[in-house]
Image (spheres, coloured by chain):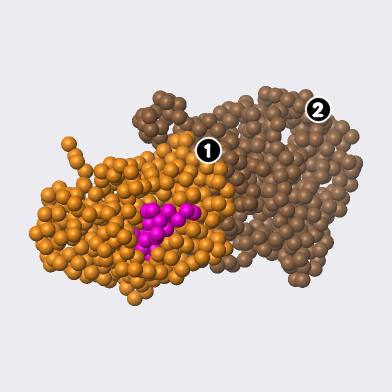
Chain colours: A brown, B orange
Amino acid sequence: MVGITAYGAYIPKRRLNRMAIIQSMGWLAPALMTAAAGERSMCNWDEDALTMAVAAARDCMTGMDKSAVNAAYLASTSLPFKERQNCGILSTALSLPEEGLVTADFTASLKSGTTALLTAIDAVQGEGKDSVLVTASDARQTKAAWFFEMWYGDGAASLLLGKDNVIAEFKGAYSVSCDFVGAYRGAFAKYDYGWEERWIREQGFTKIIPAAINGALEKCGLSMDDVSKVVYPCHLSPRVHQSIAKPLKIAPDKIQDNMADVLGDTGAAHPLVMFVAALQDANPGDKIVVASFGQGCDALVFEVTDNIKKLPARNGVKGALANRKEEAQYSKFQKFRDLVNVEMGIRAEANKQTALSAMWRYRKQVLGLTGGKCTTCGTIQYPKSRMCVNPDCNAVDTQEEHVFADKTGTIKSYTGDMLAVSVDPPAVYGLVQFEGGGRALFDFTDCELGEVKVGQPVKMSFRMKYYDEPRDFHGYYWKAVPQT
Amino acid sequence: MATGIRDKVAILGMGCSKFGERWDMGGEDLLVEAFQECIEDAGIEKNEIQAAWLGTCFPEISVGQSALPLSMSLRLPNIPVTRVENFCASGTESFRGAVYAVASGAYDICLAAGVEKLKDTGYGGLPEFGANAGPRAWMTGVNMTAPGSFAQLASGYGAKHKVSDEEIKRALAHISAKSHANGVKNPKAHLRKAVSEEQIMAAPIIAHPLGLFDCCGVSDGSACAIVTTPEIAKSLGKTDLISVKGLQLSLSNGYEMGYNEWEVDHFVTTSKASTKAYEEAGIKNPREEVSMMEVHDCFSITEMVTMEDLHISPRGGAIKDIMDGFYDADGGVPCQIDGGLKCFGHPIGASGLRMLYEMYLQLLGRAGDRQLKDPRIGLTHNLGGFPFMNVCSVAIIGRYEK
């Protein structure tokens, strides 16, 4: 039996109230009012498609064996690097073993998430791999005061594929691949360019998705009556999303909620995000169809097994949606998305060039939050060093690797710095003491200064650390998230 | 067997420029200003100086690297000149180089100078390190400024000693108000206006809980000293000799930031350097025997915990002593009698020497309106880096009584 063995998701904490966009920009585009219901998720300034992917993958790997993963795929249309495999960064962040690992980025289409999923299934079925991690994530840039900004959300989902303790068995799939271009983004463009929505609905969604789903059901020898939930994305209005069900004769209660009112459309991630949400509500025996849309459609059929009850607890989409903070200030969204030209002062002109040789040498520390454990005295320390930090030990070259990423920490000191260059002042940071040992200074994120206290627990989160603009280089590291 | 530095070296002369926003002067010019006063005070010719040390922390933005800036601006006669840098202890390190050179017997008369020109950066606050702080600076370094790094002592100290934010804020205000009151009397200080505790507590926050008046300013300045042996000083006609009693450094080794004990409530290095300095100087009861101190008040919170690290206030007892006025000008151990970094600002390479300059003037009875009654021992303290990883210097000078 081949199928899903674990799932995970990540949605940024901030939710931009769509009315905030209207209040600020409604004068320019009154038509936006038609899309103004609810809220869309919004990356913090230090989040992007890659950081969300890492968070979703970590959620997925909760209680699972990272050392057994032999392939990792990352699907997105908004990754930070065009050359430098983004999945390689994700794999290092998860401390997946480098030896024997296959990694790949799947890009340039909103169906790349399901394509990566299909490829993973092929790999496991083909006996070449027995544990494949698939993650899809998108944080798309949008121009101010247009429908894309209203419709899109930021988010990521992750699935582990394998043969043991399968929670949702793969039953079959069917794909249609065609060069239907509802919207596109050129290699050097920042924003999507889209054609008329009515045409996208009538010639795209309404024709291509049913073709693929019908093909998948036929291949599996199933009818729509056998299916419990059908997952398919549509970023256009909720009414349009529902209308795609008609040609397929899907009963309304079987249409998986596309979460337009609480999340928005998360691009390449969305079919997997919706699938994870469906799994969290599913019962053993349920058959779920998962379809995508973007230059065609991949449709996959899964059947949930008893093992779903045994999966160790994780956040998934439900937990991520619940961790919510309303953002009522559209100007924050504008600054975080670089839509406004703000003077950051001379202090912000600092040279941020990254020595790639040093980045390679320190990659496990920087990307994997790995420190050391002295095998002579047992002291756990960060970073890993040649000389043990224990003043009663100081042994040389005795440390083995110790990963801190999943450890809980406690705040020992903190401050909120108004002088530090920040797009969301004050910059909050402090000393974190890890359970079991080890400590270091970290930037804190996703918190308010007034809520931070000495003694408060923190969890670590992979975030964008700096952007070297002249060299278009994003640097990543870990930050502490105070837990309330 | 080494016997320490006590009474082996005497200060022949000292000079100090006016500190402040010296738009009219570059670093090279400020060195000349301090040196002219120093050489006149020493009463010797320039060609009698045999070796020199220059302390400067940010050469990239002020005078440039190597020790050439000192040799060039003072037109020194092709003698050995060494540039030293140890963050905020750079000025004291410069002094240390000159002092050890004389004590070793390698030279008779040496010069220690320090300078920093910080006001050419174009913005307030200490300059950004950029990628100059090593390859991991951007990759893993926290988005930290100097005020933010020291501000954390407040949360650590408060948690450890169960002291409220309000109590700490009030003690910090007293510290800065006291220093400002002292600076009013100092024509060389940058800031010379009195500020009330209420003004200080109401000031805008820079890095919680430090407000504008809890942070020393950024300014330009230079100071220097000429040192020699007590015998040579006497032979040159000096009568009231001021000698070096103790001169110690202590540097972090990763314990604070990497081991699992330190509670962000004090400075490990200051606690150790001061103990060694008192031992070297023969001081058994610092609270009784130290007459006056200049400590590193880059931020008022640093001064607060330093009172304990110098073993003058007991652990957990600094706030009480501060609020009792023990460190005020008329208190048991006046601290920052010249106004401190608070009033002078912190031209990094010069600060350690500026502190010694005030102790020197006080010991010789030349401190004018600020003069304390009959001081015998003066202590200076520098703290460079940040609470988690730092360089501490403690220097003790006093009357040479042999």
Which residue is painted at 40% across and 69% down in the image? B184
Which residue is painted at 71% across and 28% down in the image? A311
Task: Please say whether residue A205 is visible from this viewpoint.
Answer: yes
Asked which secondary structure carries label 1, the reply is: strand
Name the amino acid, label 2.
Pro
Q: Where residue A24 sits: x, y (%)?
A: 73, 67
Which residue is painted at 51% across and 45% down in the image? B157
| The image quarter in which residue A274 lies | top right
- Say which of A7 and A2 sits in front: A7
**Chain that bears disc 1:** A
Whether the magenta-drawn stretch holds residue B219 is answered as no
- Say which of B296 and A453 sits in front: B296
- Say which of A88 and A45 sits in front: A45
Q: Main secondary structure of the magenta part?
A: loop
| Residue bearing mark 1 | A433
Whether the magenta-drawn stretch holds residue B350 is answered as yes
Q: Where residue B164 sits: x, y (%)?
A: 58, 48
**Chain that bears disc 2:** A
Q: Is residue A89 above or below residue B26?
A: above
Q: Is residue B327 above or below residue A344?
A: above
| Residue bearing mark 2 | A284
Which span is picked out in magenta?
A: B323-351
Asked which secondary structure carries label 2, the reply is: loop
